[in-house]
Image: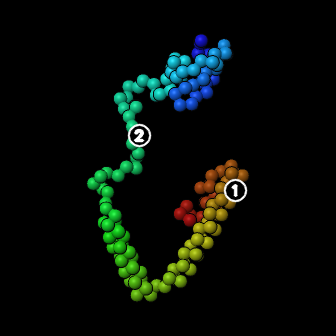
Amino acid sequence: MNTEQSIETHCSANNCQVSTPEGNDSKRGTLKSFLPFSFRTPFSKFKKVHSNFKSPLQVAESAKVSPAEEAAELVRRREQLDSEIAQLEAEGYRVEELEHHIDKMHEYNDIKDIGQSLLGRIAALRGTTTRDLYSHFGLELDD
């Protein structure tokens, strides 16, 4: 059988049924016995091609902390944040005022995004860059 012929396989566990144009459907065995190639990574000059997978998110053993230490760190962080909140309230800031300010910032960012989109569309229609339109409309690049 040459490699240009089509080979159809039906595998389950280690047994595979192989269909070739010659009709050898009744033969059973391992796939390696029928095919001249392997499904594994071919030979490589790199020695660790077939090594176990190592996740890039691994944490070094020395960096791991016990649950008690993690809980203590979270309690310390919460106390720190509570003290910062108390300091801001002592300086006259109110939560409602901050929420209002945040809402206004969101509205500003939404309007700015729409403006950027419009400038991009105008630039595309005119066949120019958005940067050129900034100067045309008297806008600063930092705007």
Residue 60 vs residue 99: left or right? left
Q: Which one is nearer the viewer's eye here, 31 or 66? A: 31
Label 1 sits on what residue type? Ile
Does residue 136 show up? no
Q: Which one is nearer the viewer's eye here, 114 or 88? A: 88
User: Is 39 placed above or below 127 here?
Assistant: above
Under circle 1, the secondary element is helix
Where residue 122 is drawn, which disc sits there? 1
Residue depicted at 37% across the width and 80% down the height: 83
Under circle 2, the secondary element is loop
Residue 118 vs residue 33: left or right? right
Q: Quadrant of residue 66?
A: bottom left
Q: Residues within 10 Å of mark 2 (few under 14, many from 20)?
A: few
Where residue 93 is drawn, which disc sits there? none
Label 2 sits on what residue type? Phe
Q: Which one is nearer the viewer's eye here, 19 or 86? A: 19
User: Is 114 placed above or below 98 here?
Assistant: above
Is the residue under label 2 in contact with that under label 1 (CB below 8 Å)? Answer: no
State the image coordinates of residue 28 (x, y, percent, origin top left): 57, 20
User: Is 71 placed above or below 43 here?
Assistant: below
Q: State the quadrant of the N terminus.
A: top right
State the image coordinates of residue 43 (x, y, percent, origin top left): 42, 23
State the image coordinates of residue 110 (x, y, percent, origin top left): 62, 67
Q: Residue furthest top?
A: 1
Q: Quadrant of residue 12?
A: top right
Q: Which residue is mark 2?
A: 53
